[in-house]
Amino acid sequence: MTDNASGDSPRLPPAVSKPSGKAARVIEGAKFGMFGGVFTPCTLTILGVIMFLRYGQVVGSAGLLWALVILAVSKLITILTTLSLSAAATNTRVQGGGAYFLISRSLGVEFGGAIGLVFFLAQAISVSMYVIGFTEAFEQTVPFAINFKLVAIACNTLVFTCVFIGAGWTIKLQYFILVTLIASLFSFFLGAQPLFSFELLRSNLGSAYEMGDNGSRENLFTMFALFFPAVTGIMAGANMSGDLKEPSQAIPKGTLWAVVATAIVYAGIAIVLAGSASNRALHDDPLIVRTVSLWPWLITAGVFAATLSSALGSMMGAPRILQALARDTIFPKLQIFAVGSGPSAEPRRAIILTYVLSTICIIAGDLNSIAPLITMAFMITYGTINLATFYETITKNPSYRPTFRYSHWSTALLGAVGCASVMLLIDWKWAFWSTAIMAGIYYFIYRKQVVSRWGDLSNGLMFERTRKNLLKLEQTLYHPKNWRPIILAMSGGSANRRYLAIFGHWLTSGHGILNIGQVIQGNVEDLIDRIENQEEVLSNFIRKEELEAFPNVVASPTVSEGIEYLIQCSGLGALRPNTLLLGWPGAESKAEPLVASMRVIEELGRNVIIAKFNEVDEDPWLAPPGTIDVWWRGRQNGELMLLLAHLLKQNREWQNRTIRLMRIVSDEAAREEVERHLRELAINSRIEVKTEVFVSDDATSVIQRQSRHSAIAFLGFALPAEGTEAHFFHSMEQMSLEIPRTLLISSIGNMKLET
């Protein structure tokens, strides 16, 4: 395990330098290979108490044929998950934390944190379940009465002591347990040989379901639910990932060999049980394996070995998950468990916490109610591993290059669906609640906005989805019905032009895209450092103002040329800016180059908005009081003005403002016809407005008088002929002289209201 979340440094405890000499050899010596670090713990966890105490009931109730089907389906799901696990393990430099590490580095901190926390708790509680299983078997074996909880606590303390000493000692102890387990299986097969009968085998081929202990009738699904937890030990090796010499090789090989070997063992036991015991004996004798065995005491030893090995595996795995989770600082209060002890960074603080939790559960006694949640935690973890591999494959992430070649997106998807199906078959209520708990933790981490220090799948998935959507938009967005404002606002990061960026945000928020542009005058070669600096300044400005925007900075000999560069180069495909938002030049001398640029922009097929604000509020985020006035002079500019007014009102700050759609006519006789036309326009465009028509020959005075107290006014304009820029400047100045805020609109007519 590493205190560097990026996984680029060696596995060292925090603030400890890399050891050398003898200490380095100690660390290397603490590493385990495929057999001891993966195959053994996986095999011992899979060949657990269900094999000894429940498998006979499965064979007797479901019948041999359906028992083998249950075995095959269960193993298929775990094999598919192992393929996904192997692909994930060979696609990254695996550090400590097992399933948590692999999921967090693929699906991100939210999924990783939720899975890691729940999986740790499930493993810790599992210790108490295995210890209680051992104590029950011990109670049935000894001829005298015992204090159940004291024996269970003593057993739990023994397991804790073995793991606390170190993983090396525990692995050696598991070798002894594995030998004991193999001896018990030999005893069973040898004892069954003289009892085996093909006639008995044929009689046990079919199902013979009876009433269960809860009063409901057994069926195929209840037998599947009873047996499936027996095969959920494939993560026992992956949980030791930080203690393996070559995890990317050991995890795939060791886990697959364990799955295959245990499948053969389970198939052999099912066939032998069906051929050596009657259906009644299979139903009624929980320890039918011991009854058939040549040396029954070896079966008792096997039961002890199975329960103790599972307890040891969980006691070793849970602390390593917690340590990896703590080192990634997703939950800051867990950081005390990030520290490792000794040269091999043993997670002893986390081991103590695991021991405390398991002891509390033993004292509480009733684990039946929480046992389904533990199974669900395992299944969600397996399903998420499959899901991560599926998404890594279909997003075609260039960094996804697993050396394990036998995983495909279809196998990963089938594994995920299989895990979800098993959860529903076992208990749909617990499936719902466990998923809800995971979702709650996910949302908690998401709200904290924890930033990962490693690349994860969310970026790749977002990129692939965006890429495909961009290609689709390229063919559909250009229809006038699909028009949306994609605005390039030339505000830069300047504080005195905040209003431009904020109005650009209001006009696009939730409906379009905003780009914030800035032009630096000069030669590009001389301004490389300044461009980078201004991009950072502009990004900080966007974050500070909480804008939904993208920064765009260019260097050019003149501001006009820079604006032309930006309007051509900003965006991508159909998402290039279709509208330019500028500030009013403020001086006649600046009008000529501005109008020249606008002519180029119009020829490029872009709309132009010029913001002329005579009053700039101290806080531009506060929408000013008054109406939103749209001065209609025809469809060329009017449709865009009315749509922008509607989009402005969609913002929470502007919801209580009234849109006034107004027009000036020179003849009283035309008033009624124009009013009717404006009302029809509002109805057809489905925009709520108040229509007003004024009769006057002096449009400027009417506009100034009526919009003097407006929040903002929209006025259309046409680009002036060459040589008349000064006249255009003064006429616009005069028309908006007494209006606090004006947006001057020049539209190329690329959108339609009545669609």
Image: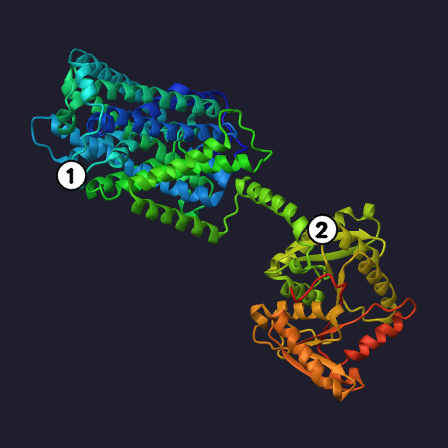
The quadrant in which residue 204 appears is top left
Q: Quadrant of residue 361?
A: top left
Label 2 to label 1, Cα distance in Å? 73 Å
Name the amino acid type tagged 2. Answer: Asn
Q: Nearer the viewer, residue 90 or 188?
A: 188
- Coordinates of residue 479 in the picture (x, y in percent): 68, 56
Find residue 214 and report its horizontal and vertical position in percent.
17, 41
Does residue 260 appear left or right of residue 568 in this picture?
left
Neighbor class of circle 2 (other Cα within 10 Å; few <14, some 14-19, many 20+) is few
Q: Pick the residue in front: 582 or 273.
A: 273
Disc 1 crowd, CA 10 A, few/some/many (<14, 14-19, 20+): few
Name, please, the residue furthest toward the right: 723
In contact (CB < 8 Å): disc 2 and disc 1: no
- Image coordinates of residue 679 in percent, x first then y, are 64, 78
Q: Nearer the viewer, residue 379 or 602?
A: 602
Q: Secondary structure at mark 2?
A: helix
Considering the image in quadrants, where does the C terminus appear? bottom right
State the SS at label 1.
Answer: loop
Is residue 216 toward the left or the right of residue 178 in the image?
left
Q: Which mark is residue 408?
A: none
Between 617 and 173, which is closer to the camera in this rendering?
A: 617
532 shown above or below 607: above
Task: Name the residue located 15 percent from the left edge and 42 percent from the top edge.
Answer: 215
* Residue pictured at 44% horizontal, 51% vertical: 443
Inspect this view and state whether residue 413 appears: yes
Number of marks in picture:
2
Measuring 80% from the left and 59% from the top, which residue is drawn there? Answer: 601
Instruction: Return the x and y of residue 578 as percentages of the image width and height.
Output: 72, 58
Q: Which mark is residue 533?
A: 2
Q: Amino acid at mark 1?
A: Asp
Q: Tell me the residue that label 1 is attached to.
A: 213
State whether residue 22 is above or below residue 690.
above
